[in-house]
Image: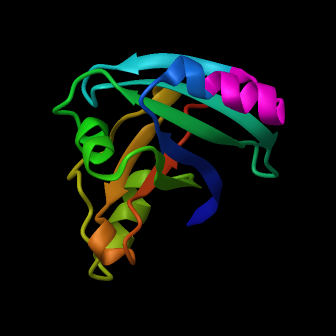
Amino acid sequence: MLTRIDHIGIACFDLDKTVEFYRATYGFEVFHTEVNEEQGVREAMLKINETSDGGASYLQLLEPTREDSAVGKWLAKNGEGVHHIAFGTEDVQGDSEAIRGKGVRVLYDQPRIGSMGSSITFLHPKDCHGVLTELVTSNPDH
């Protein structure tokens, strides 16, 4: 089942400015950056620590690349801040099916490709006490 907090996603208007804040304030450095065209975001992963299961915990900073993306719409409604929490799992497909069986809506029928080649899906926030929740199986090559 779920093994760790993989990352906390933070939506921001200016990725470079937000990265600089976390670097200057807390000393966090960028571990990985990418643009996810499907999700319409530019992101930076800031590694916080290694975990006992071989994974890591990150802050994921998300800047929309288009207004109609999920993060773009969220920012327009809510402003900057915590967007979602992601839990690590060895089997995103199996765990999402088990959670779906408990009455929680899973947003994707099949996992999609996320940051650093991971396998991801999301759980509906209305079924998770208002928290958009992501399940992540890390890519072992990262």
- Identified at 48% across, 30% down, the residue is 115
Q: Is residue 142 visible?
A: no
Number of dots carrying numbers: 0
Quarter containing the C terminus: top right
Closest to the observer: 88 or 84?
84
The magenta stretch spans which residues? 19-30
Colour convention: rainbow
Query: Secondary structure of the magenta portion, mostly?
Result: helix
Examine the structure image and report whether residue 28 is included in the region drawn in magenta.
yes
Closest to the observer: 132 or 115?
132
Q: Is residue 140 visible?
A: yes
Q: Residue furthest left?
A: 68
In this picture, is 103 found above or below 82? Answer: below
Horizontally, residue 30 falls left or right of residue 96, namely: right
Quarter containing the N terminus: bottom right
Q: Horizontal and vertical percent for residue 97?
A: 32, 66
- Identified at 23% across, 56% down, the residue is 107
Examine the structure image and report whether residue 18 is included in the region drawn in magenta.
no
- Identified at 30% across, 76% down, the residue is 127
Q: Horizontal and vertical percent for residue 74?
A: 29, 47
